[in-house]
Amino acid sequence: MDAPYHRSITTQALGEWFSARALQVIIAANLSLDGLVGQLLHPEYHFDDNAFAAGEAFVQARRAEVRPWLEAGEREKAWRAFGKVTHAVQDFYAHTNYVALWLGQPDKKRIRPRLRLIRSARRFCPVPNLSLAVCIIPGNC
């Protein structure tokens, strides 16, 4: 996903909940995962190459860093960890057909994505149920 999309999605979702400085750090961390090393060596950052388990582990590991950094008074480190979560979750939905699969299920069988509360950010961060996902980006699967 291109930087303008990540920037726009993150700003729209979090702009009213974070200060301008925090949002700047969160967006910078989000965009940092699209660097050359991230693109070539870390499919888990983007849920590419069917790296669903590794991607979910990456999201959970970064998510687990947020609260301890906040409790230690390290707000910028917490914001950076959270920014990386936002990137991976955005790419999950952009790089897979999870939503199409979810919407295509009969209502009675539809499995809703799990939502996990990030209390320190006082917002919900979607962490999808990866069991239904299939990578659909040609060349990345």
Image (cartoon, helix red, strand yellow):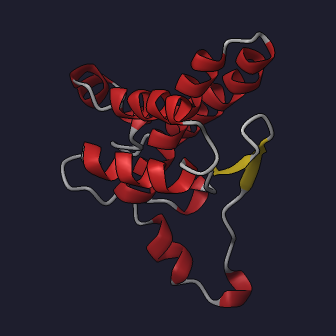
Q: Out of 7 and 105, give the one closest to the viewer.
A: 7
Compared to 98, does 46 lie above or below?
above
Q: Viewed as shown, does residue 62 lie left or right of 69?
A: left
Q: Viewed as shown, does residue 63 lie left or right of 99?
A: right
Compared to 66, does 114 lie above or below?
below
Residue visible at 49% across and 59% down in the picture: 133
Residue visible at 43% across and 27% down in the picture: 29
Could you tell me residue 81's position as x and y percent? 57, 25
Res. 1 in view:
no
Residue visible at 35% across and 55% down in the picture: 95
Occupied quadrant, residue 134? bottom left
Could you tell me residue 103's position as x and y percent? 53, 81
Q: Viewed as shown, does residue 76 lie left or right of 115?
A: left
Compared to 31, does 97 lie above or below?
below
Could you tell me residue 77's position as x and y percent? 59, 16
Res. 42 in view:
yes
- Residue that lies at the very extreme toward the front in this rendered image: 20
Could you tell me residue 82's position as x and y percent? 58, 32
Occupied quadrant, residue 46? top left
Number of marks in the rendered image:
0
Compared to 130, does 42 lie above or below?
above
Q: Out of 119 and 138, give the one closest to the viewer.
A: 119
Q: Viewed as shown, does residue 3 lie left or right of 132?
A: left
